[in-house]
Amino acid sequence: MQPFKKYSYRPIYFSLLLLVTANMLQAKPVIIDTDMGGDDWLAILYILAEPSIQIKAITINGTGLGRSEPSSNNLFHILDIACADPIPVALGSDQPRSGNNTFPNWIRDQTDDFQGLTVRHSNRTVKDISAPQLINQVIEKSDERVTILVLGPMTNLATALVNNPALADRIDRVVAMAGAIETPGNLIDLPGFKTSNNTAEWNVYLDPKAMEIVMNSINNLILIPLDATKDVPANGDLVSRIRKSGHSEASNFVANTIEGWRELDGRYSTYMWDPVAAMYLVRPEFIATKKGRLTIDSNPDSITAGNLTLTHNGTTLSYGVKADQRSFENSFVEAISKNFCESGQH
């Protein structure tokens, strides 16, 4: 190779370096709070694939689908297959702030068991502080306001706000997969769980008092409720697109996870709940939102526990009303199909 050819690449190299540096500087700081259900796994991988987001911490909520300790092992597997840089992780309580609402144990067991998928050994470890403490620490140390993406009950965030009310002023916004506002809830009778509550969504129902605390504390709260997520079902076509577009360990994991949600007759009855909320951080235009005044039934023992109602005197917040399925699928497949370990992660 001629010397002039060798040095002719230097401007390109430095231009790329400057571009990467600029992207890192512009990346928005985000804390992910997760109950580590199957859709959370996919949402976390999607965020890991997005250079516009810098994950400052992941906090695990033990009041939702997964219990805290086994969930940490599942999370580390996901971070490892994405070749993610070290990210602080902390565990939250397995008890809601009020009441004893919970998923049936058999559902939690399946979640903790990683849907039967293999969990590789990881050298990652959890912090020796609680999830609410880590939320407080990250926000207090950040030079800019932090966004919080909540993918489960609000227990960890509510506890952090109760312990330090001033924290709310340093939060840029909270985006949460939560609620059912102008559409029915998703609680149904299950083995070990009977209910007549047809208005609540699981994440709110499991700790409605925590939801009330967050609603009363955060000025910029954006809910991605069932009203929007019902437009984006999990289905076999999505799995096929993922398998055709990528062959990395991460994309295979995503396809296998979604396939694990099929019913015995081969049909899908689940939705891309948390990935839809995660994508809103990056591409908010794919969800139509509006503002409304909402009140919540925060009594965990009420027959309408977790119900969010539009009223004239409620808390003003934004919520999603419709999602564009095609836009979601195109963006999700593109992100998940990348080779995480070759492209480098933040």
Image (cartoon, rainbow, N blue to C red):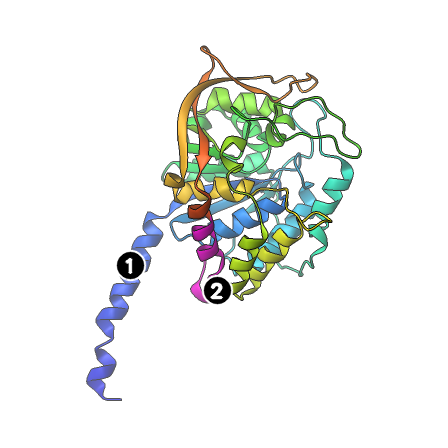
Residue 58 lies, in percent from the top left, at 54, 44
Q: Residue at 45% across / 11% down in the picture?
A: 312
What are the residue bounds of the magenta stretch?
A: 329-346
The answer to whether residue 125 shows anywhere in this view is no
Residue 37 lies, in percent from the top left, at 63, 43
Residue 75 lies, in percent from the top left, at 61, 50
Q: Amino acid at mark 2?
A: Asn
Q: Nearer the viewer, residue 89 or 79?
A: 79
Residue lying farthest to the bottom in this orientation: 1
**Tag in front: 2 or 1:** 2
Q: Residue at 52% across / 52% down in the picture?
A: 45
Mark 1: few/some/many CA within 10 Å (<14, 14-19, 20+): few
Question: Image height check: is 342 above or below 345?
Answer: below
Q: Nearer the viewer, residue 149 or 164?
A: 149
Secondary structure found at label 2: loop
Residue 282 lies, in percent from the top left, at 40, 44
Among the 4 quarters of the image, the one containing residue 296: top right
Residue 337 forms part of the magenta stretch:
yes
147 sits to left or right of 300:
left
Q: Which residue is mark 2?
A: 339
Q: Amino acid at mark 1?
A: Leu
Q: Which residue is mark 1?
A: 19
Among the 4 quarters of the image, the one containing residue 80: bottom right
